[in-house]
Amino acid sequence: MTKRKGCRDWRWLALWWHHFFLLWSTIAGQTRYSIPEELKQGSVVGNLAKDLGLGLSEIFDRKLRVASDAGKQYFSMDAGKGELVVNDRIDREALCGQSASCVLPLQVVVENPLQSHRIEVEIRDINDNTPSFLTQEINLKIPESVGPGRRFPLENAEDPDVGSNSLKTYTLSKNDHFSLKFKDTTSGKAVPELVLEKPLDREKNAFHQLLLTALDGGTPVTSGTCKITITVLDNNDNFPVFSENEYKVVLKENITTGTFLVKLTATDADDGLNGEVRYSFGSRTPDSVLSTFAINVETGEIILKGPLDYESNKYYLIDITAKDRGVPEMEGHSRVQLDIEDINDNAPEIVLTSDPSPVPEDARSGTVVALISARDLDSGENGKVTLHLSKSFPFALKPSFSNNYELITSGPLDRERSSEYNIEIKATDSGNGSGMTKRMRYQDWRWLALWWHNFFLLWNTIDGQTRYSIQEELKQGSVVGNLAKDLGLALSDIFDRRLRVASQAGEQYFSVDAGKGELVVNDRIDREALCGQSASCVLPLQIVLENPLNLHRIEVEIKDMNDNSPSFQTKELSLKIAESAAVGTRFVLESAEDADVGSNSVKSYTLTKNECFTLKMKEVEDGKAVPELVLEKPLDREKKAIHQLLLTALDGGNPVLSGTSQITITVLDVNDNFPMFEKNTYKVSLQENTAQNTFVVKIAATDADEGPNGEVEFSFGSRTPDSVLSLFEINPLTGEIHLKGDLDYEKASSYKIEITARDKGVPEMESHCRLQIDIVDVNDNTPEIVLTSEPQPVREDAASGTVVALLNARDADSGNNSKVTLRVPKGSPFTLKPSFSNNYALVTSGPLDRESFPEYNVEITATDSGSPPLTSKNIIPVIITDVNDNPPVFTQRNYNVYLKENGVPGSILYSVSASDLDLNTDGPIKYVEVLGGDMLSQSQSFRSCMSPMSEYSDFTLIKPSSTTDFKEVISVLDASLPDSTWTFESQQVRRKLKK
């Protein structure tokens, strides 16, 4: 491929500097100057004429000029002084970048003869640039879950200066959470890194403002700054917190459904979804609560959705959970105590403990006719019952104990006047509203419950006339006590007076052994079923005797035995705890239940040994101790995702009984891990002729988190230039990078690309690595031949080695592909003489003959060392100038001329002709006739004869001349022909006279 002399592009400019900086710097320059950059125009570099040994006149005479391919003519000659001076602004950073040495190579070319001198001008750096950051403000987003010690690479400052004037260090404004450290890279540069020294807490400080300062080593020191704004990203590390640990509300039992009861308020210090709270009832809330109350998940308002009944439930203790919407969810707990206020919605009831017995008309006043009890399901004043009889009847009501009465006679009876009485007894409670009369014998399930309630609560306050104490679970038939003896009865009274044990407890737990008068166990007695957790368990009995009708109160205390083990409602408890939970956080556990009481009840809890959790007890209002799990050490899901604990409840019986609950703690993932690349730096080499869509490399990164927190997406860094984005593309899911553009080694020999791996967690976590793609040069550029000077005409008698032209060979490729060899055709009288780098001189190498070859088109062939090699050619025209190296030559060696004897003087006798191969620059051919030798004796008349100095070749007959010194004539003729080496030989002309 042939290149034209004038062809230039930016690549050649870059390559020119590359060649000269790298190659010339290895060769000692003949003349070297050193100047600082930014000298004013006209500043003297050095006396070039003197240093090259040239006179001032030669600057003009020999056309001295400074040849440069640098694009700009930075230097020129002051011809009057012979000094090399600055011709244009010289910016070292623009010329040499960060190169430690900056030398401008020049060629000083002089002509007549053509010569080239190598000149080097070293450009010294001055501190004329301050360090600067590409980005004046850096915004970093760091999750608050990031642990101390984490490093965050910062942007490097750039300082175009070099050496001591270059960038030396960085400083960081004072901050409690961050410090500055440096990381050495393979390039030798130190990269500043921000190091987290103290845990972040977004709720305390959501933003951190830092100032990064870069300092150079110049005098004075100059600096550049970059403002760093750190936004602390929220992690779901806060539990919702209720405004109160326990809410207390009093409700009338007759309020209507849909009534607003209470609004719960919980706040979460986190941000966004992490701080949005939703409310719900606790996971173990019974159906009786769920059917009666509803909670608004968004507002926390509790409303009534079912009827209340004080007699069924006097109060409700409801666990409330507040959960945020973060990942993972965090929850807080509170309790609502709803106390139901009784209203007078139940009429009192009259119950006959014994059927009325016939009464003799002569019965004394005070004779017992019937046993009656009064009761009311309501409480307080609403449950206080008063019985009334009409004063017209000869009967009265005599209270015995609690709400038990004896109907007795209060006056004389006369069967003949009134053989039967229908006595109306009116029961009235003390609540608001009139009393109601109830028919005797009316009962329902509530009466059974109320019966026990009345007797347990009221009879316990009255000393029984007779009291027994037995263990629960006695066998049927076991003796409680000798009832007949204790009541002062004879065994015959048991039959005669129809002794019976009256009970409304639903079960007839006792009976009387009539043969022995003993009170015996009739059925299984389970204290826990009868009295629950009551500290005292007394069964009140009524012993009814007839004839006459008497009532005795008997109390049987049921003592607890350790026949129940503590038990958990949930045998396997699953807890989900976020790994971001703070040390000290407490998690309420389910309490164990033990039907036994007193020393036989639950006394303590134990927990299997675990380094992360301990067990503590929390006292609650009812005096119970609630077990709580306390976090003692931070959780790390990536190290241990599941914790298995065994909670054991122990009672105080002898022997001790226990119950267990298996606690499985699932550590919920928090996005606290950054994606980790397999390598910090990936290195790949690509041929520059690689086809588009070619797979380049696969970047791999893993994230120890799970779910979206561990799903990684890849992308190029935020500051990736368009030149990279136009050439490469990355698959965000697989990390595979493909080539999508055309590579050109001459434009860029390598690419350093920042890769970002970002997970899908909230907040996102990201890491960075670097991909270095080195482009391997292929031989895709033909070498080029550039004339440093125009070819000069060459004399044909020029000595071998005469410089004809100055050449430069170059190739935009690199390595062997850029090594260029020049050659000229064999047999040519020219050769190439290398000077320095790829500069050559075209010189003569053999004799020249203008008459044979007045002009040469010298073909120069440039061939690189690539595979396959590429070749270009350039034709250099060389003109050969003439010298007087050829004598004139006559057309004939001998001329025979015949003269007439009577020829007239002055007449033309004959014309001769001669030619010369040299150019016309030496003047016209001159002719002369010389007579000598024996011709002088042939005739006195023609002793000598010559033609005048003339451009014509005619011989003219003239008079005899007395001139005899022919050498002098020849010398005169020869002298008139400067630079002539012609020779003349005498020609003998035969003259014959015709008669």
Image: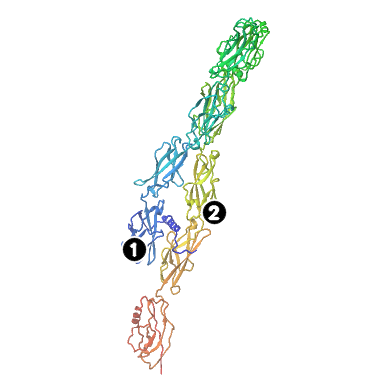
- Disc 2 crowd rating (10 Å Cα; few below 14, some 14-19, many 20+) is some
Give residue 501's position: percent from left, percent from top: 64, 12
* Residue corresponding to mark 1: 54
Residue 54 sits in quarter: bottom left
Check disc 2 and report its element: helix, strand or loop. loop
* Residue corresponding to mark 2: 692
Q: Is residue 559 above or below residue 144?
A: above
What kind of residue is marked 2?
Gln
Give residue 432's position: percent from left, percent from top: 53, 19
Give residue 869's position: percent from left, percent from top: 52, 60
Check disc 1 and report its element: helix, strand or loop. loop
Q: Is residue 782 above or below residue 717?
A: below
121, 173: nearer the viewer: 173
The dot on residue 732 is none
646, 611: nearer the viewer: 646
For the C terminus, the image quarter is bottom left
14, 317: nearer the viewer: 317
